Image: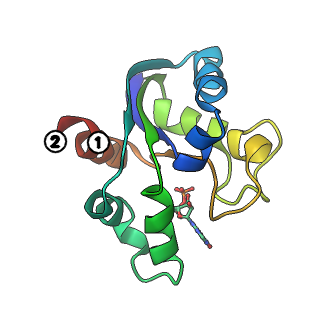
Amino acid sequence: MSERAFVMIKPDGVRRGLIGEIVSRFEKKGLSVVKAELVQVSEATAKEHYGHLEAKPFFRELVDYITSGPSFAMIVEGTAAVKNSRYLIGSTNPADAAPGTIRGDYGLDVSENVIHGSDSIDNARIEIERFFIR
Ligand code: IDP
C-alpha cells in the first residue's frame, strides 16, 4: 500500500553536496519524491521535532546541529515508504549502520548522521505537517 514518509537531509549532508546522491538512492529504490524544499529549521521547530530527546545530554548540541544551516526536507511516497526509507537510511549511529545504507556510506559520527527519516506512519504524518503544511 502506498504511503508517505518524511525524510530530511540534515545540514551536514547539504553542506557536503550529498542532496543529488541521496535523492537518487530513493528514486532507484522506486520511491517517489513528491515534494521537496530547502529549509532553515528554526530553534522552535528543532526543539519540537526532537522533543522526545529533550532530557538527553546531547539535546543542545542536536538543536545547534539541525539549525546550523539549510536542510533538504522531502515527502517520499511509495509502497511501505516509512519502512523502506528507514532501511535505506540505516542505523542511527553511522558506526553501526551497514555499508550500502546512507548513514553507513556517508556518516562517521552519531552527532552528524546526514539524514532523518520518520520512524512510524503516525510520525510521518506529524512531521509532514510540521515541515510542509504549517
Ligand atoms: P533516528 O534519527 O535514527 O530516528 P533518534 O534516536 O530519534 O534516532 O535520534 C534523533 C537524532 O538525535 C539522531 O538522528 C542523531 O542526529 C541524534 N542523536 C541520537 N543519539 C545521539 C547521541 O548519542 N549523541 C549525539 N546525537 C545523537
Q: Mark 2 packing: few (<14 Cα in 10 Å), some, or many (20+)?
A: few
The colour scheme is: rainbow
Question: Would you say the residues marked 2 and 1 are in contact, meaning their CB atoms lie under 8 Å apart?
Answer: yes
Q: Residue at x 42, y 22 (%)?
A: 1
Residue 56: percent from left, percent from top: 49, 81
Q: Which residue is drawn at 77% across and 56% down?
A: 108
Q: In this view, does 8 lie above or below 95?
A: above
Q: Mark 1 packing: few (<14 Cα in 10 Å), some, or many (20+)?
A: some
- Dividing the image into four quarters, tell me where ligand 1 lies: bottom right
Q: Nearer the viewer, residue 46 or 96?
A: 46
Q: Is mark 2 on a helix, strand or loop?
A: loop
Q: Which of 99 and 22 is in front in this view?
A: 22
Q: Nearer the viewer, residue 28 or 107?
A: 107
Q: Residue at x 61, y 23 (%)?
A: 20
Q: In this view, does 81 lie to the left or right of 101?
A: left
Residue 67: percent from left, percent from top: 42, 57
Q: Which label belongs to residue 87? A: none
Amino acid on which the number 1 mark rests in the picture? Phe
Q: Which residue lies furthest to the right in this view?
A: 99
Q: Which residue is drawn at 53% across and 77% down?
A: 58
Q: Residue under circle 1?
A: 131
Q: Residue under circle 2?
A: 134
Q: In this view, does 86 lie to the left or right of 54?
A: right
Residue 41: percent from left, percent from top: 35, 51
> Quadrant of the image for the C terminus?
top left
Spatial separation of the CA atoms under disc 2 and disc 1: 7 Å
* Residue 125 falls in image quadrant: top left
Q: In this view, does 120 lie above or below 42?
A: above
